[in-house]
Image (cartoon, rainbow, N blue to C red):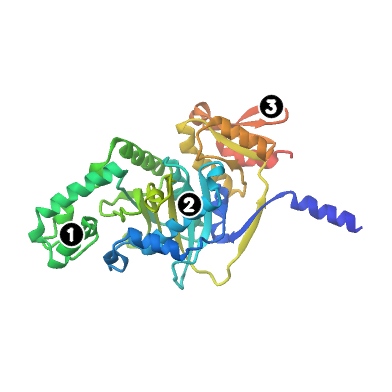
Amino acid sequence: MKNKKDKKTRNEESKYMNFLPINKMAEAAIYFGFTSTKPIQITKDDVHKASALKDAYLKNASGLPWIFSQVFAEERVALLREYLEKNLSSLPQPVMLVHESDTIKERAKHTINLEVMGTDRSIAEALLIKTAVSILKDNGYKDFIIEINTIGDKESISKFTRELTNYYKKNLNNLSAHCRQNFKKDPFYLLHCNECDLEGKLKEAAPTSISCLSDASRAHFKEVLEFIETMNIPYKINNCLVPDKKYCSGTVFEIKEILASGETGETLAVGFRYDGMAQKIGHKRDNPGVGIKIFLKKKAVIKKIAKLAKPVAFYIQLGDEAKHKSLELIEMLRQEKIFVHHMIGRDKFGSHFAHVERTKVPYVIIMGKKEFLEGSVMVRENTTRTQESIPMHTLAEHIKKLKI
């Protein structure tokens, strides 16, 4: 009798995929391919390296946006260290992580960190933004807008710094004494200061980081915006959203709540790229990455999840058109509590099928250019190699009917 009970328990357990327990508030991250991990441990050496990147006057300066917080620099240093120590570069790239953060002590907030490491492609920002928006919606947030900007690559940052410096040098007489001193340390600071613009027009006429982008950085930012438009998420470019260039690069964004009055309210999430930071703190190789920190209202009871029903399919996208549609497809399945394996962050077709073999899923869902145009997907059974075209809007229903 006991053997039958044990066998039944084993059969039930075999139907689930187990992972490190995670706050249920962040459950959406698992569906989008993030792996749950323990909170990043920041060492004294991490703090020292982060401090070396930042000017003392910026560490406690008031009026600066979240993106200048010392915590962000410390977390990135610790994250890059763990990436090396745990040899995460040996895993299929990009590496996508989700964990709770206890580095920002806010009594009324849970903070969830999402990271995409090992890729400089625009799909990384798209994955972060889509996942963050899904998490926010799951937790009761309805109306929000993305404020976004970019400072581009090393070439772009150098040009922007040069043009901004020359601009403010010509307008020093219009700056307060306090801001003239800060300008000598970092001209970026003036973009966030509300006291320095005595005539009220300096920031409005200042050079923008977007106008200084290299061709590669301009193309990257355009792709990020195309993803956001495809996802139908409201956004606006904020030229004054310029991060600390000592540890940030490329895209920077904030997700803000829209109040009933139509005005923007509190910041719900902050994200930025940190390509190039690894070498600045002494690593031999660069490790491109982008992360986002999400702030959620604290609940009285914290529920944890540690398993989901095992996926019966692996989703593969072929081409840019399909990639843009992929996030919508994953979200559609997630709404029906259907989890599928996928590697949206990768473009190589061969690596997708190699992963299909390792996961041993019975079905593969494929979207190429033809399927994208038709609004469909191809569902292939791996054993028989038979396949059929399924309208995308009926895919969830079709998967539920599959006999496994």
> Which residue is depicted at the point 29% across and 63% down?
64
Look at the picture and state if 23 lies above or below 382: below
Q: Is residue 157 left or right of residue 79?
A: left
* Distance in Å between CA atoms under marks 2 and 1: 34 Å
Q: Position of residue 389 (x, y in %)?
A: 60, 29
Q: Position of residue 191 (x, y in %)?
A: 22, 57
Tell me the quarter of the picture where residue 301 sits. Answer: bottom right
User: Crowding near pointer 1: few (<14 within 10 Å), some, many (20+)?
Assistant: few
Q: Which residue sits furthest left?
A: 173
Please tell me whether mark 1 sits on a helix, a strand or a loop.
helix
Identify the residue position indicated by label 1 in the image.
184
Q: Say which of marks 3 and 1 sits in front.
A: 1
Look at the picture and state if 4 lies above or below 212: below
Please tell me whether mark 3 sits on a helix, a strand or a loop.
loop
- Nearest the eye: 236 or 14: 14
Q: Label 1 amino acid?
A: Lys
Q: Quadrant of the C terminus?
A: top right
Q: Position of residue 12 (x, y in %)?
A: 77, 52
Q: Are marks 3 and 1 in contact (CB under 8 Å)?
A: no
Identify the residue position indicated by label 2 in the image.
115
Q: Are marks 2 and 1 in contact (CB under 8 Å)?
A: no
Q: Say which of marks 3 and 2 sits in front.
A: 2
User: Crowding near pointer 2: few (<14 within 10 Å), some, many (20+)?
Assistant: many
Which mark is first along the chain, 1 or 2?
Answer: 2
Identify the residue position indicated by label 3 in the image.
385
